[in-house]
Image (cartoon, rainbow, N blue to C red):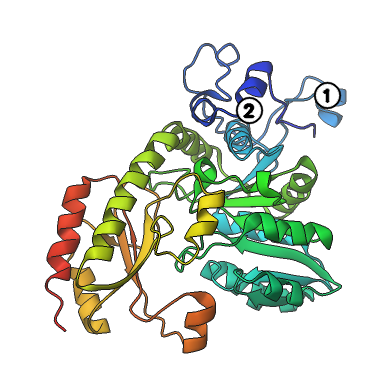
């Protein structure tokens, strides 16, 4: 079918670079939707046509079948594409749908894949468990050593996968330097940009080919969506969209409607998250019962200088290592009142997870994960109350 993401004149102007206006108004099209301030939810599986000729060759802007495209999802995709400064975006039923379809747009049988050690666990499982079935080999690198990256490149390397900052270790890669190397060898690059969001980091402007997000996090922002999205050039997104169509992994219209709602407050939520995150990280770093804090916004972070070059702000997801035994750390987490035990992040509620993984010394060095590592997401509740909650529980740790 014809490209459904043809921008009208107003959207083209919005896409020039005002993130707040993109989030609030791109795709509104009041005149098209009977003056509705909120675009409608198109909860339908198909669209009918006025003629056989039109059905065979739909005019630009018309839709055919919801597994391929939907008007509500189209608005969400246009917003994210504009935020990331991309030509097109493709939305999925989950973040893993976006990740796997994007990677598979770049690799094929007989190819080689390079990925960062600290990538999201299910992404790593996809690489280690699924790739052997399709004849693709993989090499994992720290992502912080450019010479290590160059040494890992093979004649058949097809894709370099980044996650900066990564979801637990929060390590960063020098995006511009890595993409320059990738282009020299004609290798595609994909990055998971969920931690920073398109508000605080725009990898496409640094040379990345495809950017993926889990919409369940900051983009949705209300812990009521499971979805994902990929964006990049029209050429790359055509390949990704074809994968989505065949896999049947289309983002639903209601989830798209919720994501559009969430994006209207994305800039202001991110500002609140950064303010709260910096306060909590500083508090933890100064607390006598904390061994180490891992947060990209602190000068103590090993990649702080890199972050200063490519991040314009910071989220509120961080990791730290309390003092005491693992049993004391578990008890610390169980005592918290406002930080709830949960695996996700990016919504309104504060969350905590405790790693049960026991990394070897080599894994600690290469992946940036450590015993007793605690990950917290600082939500949108009162920051003073959150700090007091952490403090009361940390003070009860027995050494």
Name the residue at 47% across, 81% down: 364
Contact, mark 2 vs mark 1 (Cβ under 8 Å): no
In the depicted structure, whether residue 389 falls above or below residue 6: below
Name the residue at 40% across, 46% down: 224
The x and y percentages for residue 359 are 45, 84
| Camera-nearest residue between 279 and 352 | 279
- What is the quadrant of residue 354 in the picture? bottom left
| Camera-nearest residue between 236 and 370 | 370
Tell me the quarter of the image containing the N terminus.
top right
In the depicted structure, whether residue 114 falls above or below residue 325: above
Q: Is residue 101 among what the camera can see?
A: no
Q: Earlier in the sequence, mark 2 or mark 1?
A: 2
Mark 1 secondary-structure assignment:
helix
The x and y percentages for residue 350 are 29, 54
Dot 1 corresponds to which residue? 54
| Camera-nearest residue between 168 and 61 | 168
Residue neighbourhood size for the residue with mark 1, other residues' Cα within 10 Å, grouped as few (<14), some (14–19), many (≥20): few
Residue neighbourhood size for the residue with mark 2, other residues' Cα within 10 Å, grouped as few (<14), some (14–19), many (≥20): many
Mark 2 secondary-structure assignment:
loop
- In the picture provided, is 118 more to the left or to the right than 301? right
Label 2 vs label 1, nearer the camera: 2
| Camera-nearest residue between 211 and 203 | 203
Name the residue at 38% across, 44% down: 222
In the depicted structure, whether residue 378 falls above or below residue 369: above
- In the picture provided, is 107 more to the left or to the right than 351? right
The x and y percentages for residue 200 are 50, 44
- What is the quadrant of residue 18 in the picture? top right
Q: Is residue 220 among what the camera can see?
A: yes
Name the residue at 85% across, 72% down: 156
- In the picture provided, is 16 more to the left or to the right than 150? left
């Amino acid at each position: 079918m014809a490209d459904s993401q043809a921008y009208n004149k107003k959207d083209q102007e919005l896409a020039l670079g005002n993130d707040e206006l993109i989030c609030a108004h791109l795709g509104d099209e009041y005149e098209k939707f009977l003056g509705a301030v909120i675009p409608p939810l198109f909860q339908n599986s198909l669209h009918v046509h006025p003629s056989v000729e039109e059905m065979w060759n739909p005019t630009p802007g018309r839709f055919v079948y919801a597994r391929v495209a939907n008007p509500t999802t189209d608005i969400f995709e246009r917003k994210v594409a504009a935020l990331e400064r991309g030509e097109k975006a493709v939305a999925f039923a989950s973040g893993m749908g976006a990740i796997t379809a994007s990677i598979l747009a770049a690799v094929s049988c007989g190819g080689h894949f390079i990925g960062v050690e600290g990538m999201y666990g299910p992404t790593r499982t996809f690489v280690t468990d699924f790739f052997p079935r399709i004849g693709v080999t993989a090499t994992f690198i720290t992502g912080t050593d450019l010479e290590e990256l160059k040494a890992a490149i093979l004649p058949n390397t097809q894709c370099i996968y980044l996650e900066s900052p990564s979801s637990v270790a929060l390590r960063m890669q020098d995006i511009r330097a890595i993409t320059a190397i990738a282009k020299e060898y004609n290798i595609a690059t994909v990055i998971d940009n969920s931690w920073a969001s398109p508000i605080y980091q725009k990898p496409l402007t640094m040379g990345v080919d495809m950017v993926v997000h889990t919409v369940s996090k900051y983009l949705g922002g209300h812990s009521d969506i499971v979805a994902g999205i990929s964006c990049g050039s029209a050429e790359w997104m055509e390949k990704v969209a074809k994968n989505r169509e065949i896999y049947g992994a289309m983002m639903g219209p209601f989830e798209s409607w919720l994501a559009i709602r969430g994006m209207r407050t994305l800039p202001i939520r991110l500002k609140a998250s950064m303010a709260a995150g910096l306060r909590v990280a500083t508090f933890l770093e100064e607390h006598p019962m904390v061994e180490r804090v891992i947060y990209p916004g602190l000068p103590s972070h090993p990649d702080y200088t890199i972050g200063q070059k490519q991040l314009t702000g910071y989220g509120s997801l961080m990791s730290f290592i309390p003092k005491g035994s693992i049993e004391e750390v578990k008890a610390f987490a169980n005592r918290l009142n406002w930080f709830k035990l949960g695996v996700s992040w990016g919504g309104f509620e504060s969350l905590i997870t405790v790693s049960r993984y026991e990394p070897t010394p080599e894994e600690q060095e290469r992946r940036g994960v450590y015993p007793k590592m605690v990950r917290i997401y600082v939500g949108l509740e009162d920051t003073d109350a959150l700090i007091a909650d952490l403090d009361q529980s940390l003070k009860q740790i027995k050494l």
